[in-house]
Image (cartoon, rainbow, N blue to C red):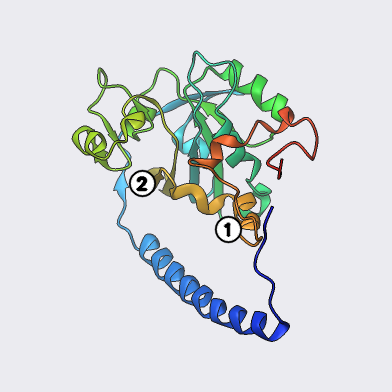
Amino acid sequence: MSGPRIVSREDWLRARIELLAKEKALTDARDEVSAARRALPMTPVEKDYRFRSASGEKSLLDLFEGRRQLITYHFMFDPSWDEGCVSCSFLVDNVAHLGHLHSRDTSFAAVSRAPVEKIEKFKARMGWTIPWVSSFGTDFNYDFKVTVDESVAPVEYNYKDKATLEREGLTHHMSGEQHGLSVFFRDGSNVFHTYSTYGRGPDIVLGTYNYLDFTPLGRQEVGTGIMFFKHHDKYESAADGPSCH
């Protein structure tokens, strides 16, 4: 397996300083986009969504757990499946200790259409402790465009309608479970939707990818590389992964 070209320390330092300028520009651009995201207007959530959890029924307001902000991850887990999506599992593996979010008045919860019994079984298998509720039997997934079923609602994913998805060759997003991340804000008992992102939008929270981006071999992707990860209990050993062989 070939790596980066070999140069003198002086040449390496020159190249590193050139890259540093690009990294700083990217950081400045990211800060600008983050500020624009925070400045987005918000819209009231009119429906009284009700979810099932291991401890009973919960409203969307309950998921805030008294905090002002709520991040929900739309975890792909169809009611007919026996385990959650591999890519979504990879993302949840990268969720940090929730105490840090809580210290900033922010709660986190995963939401799936699978029944709560399947969610709890898979959650225990993965060793996760995050709040995770079932939206089965509600409009939540359809309203937030993460379950695509033309018999229920017009086809839309990542702010693209059916014609656009077809034209761009994204027909795999035209039916079934999709992933995404939505943010809500609470003012008293009033809940507002502030932001949703889909496709590669949630990539920024994938700490594993960010670590790999520091390395010469990078993410080691072929096509949609995230699909080549496994549920973390299915790796045979630390050496089980892409190699030079």
Q: Which residue is painted at 64% across and 45% down in the image? A: 94
Of the residues shown, which amino acid type is indicated by label 1?
A: Arg
- Residue 48 visible in the current orientation: no
Q: Position of residue 234 (x, y in %)?
A: 72, 28
Q: Residue at x 48, y 48 (%)?
A: 202
Residue at label 2?
Answer: 192
Identify whether 79 is placed above or below 28. above
Looking at the image, residue 218 sits to the left or right of residue 232; the answer is left
| Tag 2 and tag 1, C-beta contact below 8 Å | no
Query: In x, y percent, where is residue 144?
Result: 35, 35
Q: Quadrant of the C terminus?
A: top right
- Residue 88 lies, with reference to residue 215, above or below; the image says above
Q: Residues within 10 Å of mark 1 (few under 14, many from 20)?
A: few
Residue 145 sits in which quadrant? top left
Q: Amino acid at mark 2?
A: Phe
Point out the residue furthest to the top here: 80
Q: Helix, strand, or loop for circle 1?
A: loop
- Which residue is at the far left? 163
Query: Circle 2 — which element?
Result: strand
Quarter of the image holding residue 129? top right
Residue ID for mark 1: 104
User: From the viewer's perspective, is residue 30 above or below residue 229?
Assistant: below
Q: Nearer the viewer, residue 52 or 189?
A: 52
Residue 201 seen in render: yes
3D distance between C-alphas at marks 2 and 1: 18 Å
Residue at (64, 50) in percent of width and height: 208
- Horizontal and vertical percent for residue 178? 42, 32
Q: Earlier in the sequence, mark 2 or mark 1?
A: 1
| Quadrant in the rendering for residue 180 | top left
Return the residue nearer the eye: 234 or 197: 234
